[in-house]
Image: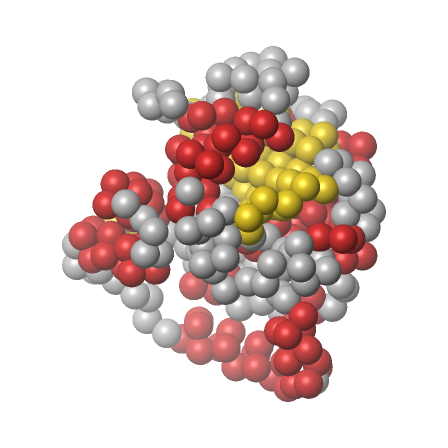
Amino acid sequence: MTTNIEPVSKTFDSQGLKLHYLDWGSAGAPILIFVHGMNDHARSWDWAARAMCREWRVIALDLRGHGDSEWSPDGAYHIAYYLLDFTDLVDTLGADQVSIVAHSMGGNPAARFAALYPQRVHKLVLVDAMGPNASVIARWRKQGVVNLSREWMEKRRRTVARAPRRFAAIDQAVERMARANKHLSNEQAHHLAIHGVRRYDDGYGWKYDPAVGNFLPEDFAFPLAEYWREITAPTLICWGPDGWTTNPATDGSSANFRDHRHITFESAGHWIHHDQLDAFVAALQQFLPAE
């Protein structure tokens, strides 16, 4: 695996925000866009990006409010805005067609883009990115629209009022990363932490806006399956049994895709691209061969 390549840091304007992405080069090669999940950042993909950038122009996006992208001043961290940002990125790159690898929450706008503009997506890889499972959606329905809206408002107000979390030293952030994912190596935890925090006057803090995790109930008002059924791009669905999501191959969600493959990565959880890196890269290289 190539280890000595570093990306170029670039920005683009989207919906009034300056958003950041990493460009791993290979000008003229087909474009492969990596999209991270909630509370994460573009450098989360470094290992996979290095493995793919010889044959692809690899782009790793920092979603709004994450990494080195600007925070939304009005807390507009809703799926529709992530979708607008992704569309603006594809237009900025001047690409008629792209392939996409998306993790977790990042799979929601990526799948919607693939459904809205099927001719613009060559292939799609969803990494534990199928969204809330049926039991979660059933619980939300039982709560009802009014209760969910009240819960969102109260959480939003608490988030704005709360003092941001700070670490006295980066090592504390590394420890936090390691606790969050038992599969991480020391090198992975350190890499993710140093790229995931910035220095403030009162210590180190995560780069992501604390408001990003406060989803509007309306974000999931439209069933994702309705988007999945419109996707024409061949889709690779990746799942790890050590995570908290249900198996798309057995819960019925994979069946909504017209053309899909499913891979279960043993001894992997939610962050498959960290937990089983070599197997994950091998799967990408098989599914996304150089053309």
Residue sitting at 78 percent across and 53 percent down?
256
Residue at horizontal 66%, vertical 54%? 249
Q: Position of residue 221 (x, y in %)?
A: 74, 68
Q: Residue at x 68, y 41 (%)?
A: 261
The answer to whether 282 appears left or right of 97 in the picture is: left
User: Does 268 appear above or below 154?
Assistant: above
Is 235 or 101 nearer to us in this picture? Answer: 235
**Quarter of the image that includes the N terminus:** top left
Position of 5 with respect to 35 (left or right) is left
- Above or below 162: residue 35: above
- Residue 291 visible from this viewpoint: yes
Visible residue check, residue 67 = no
Q: In which quadrant will I find the C terminus?
A: top right
How far from the left and from the top, in percent, is residue 153? Answer: 57, 78
155 w.r.t. 93: above or below: below
Query: Along the line of sight, which residue is nearer the eye, 52 or 171?
Result: 52
Looking at the image, which residue is at 54% across and 34% down? 283
- Total label count? 0
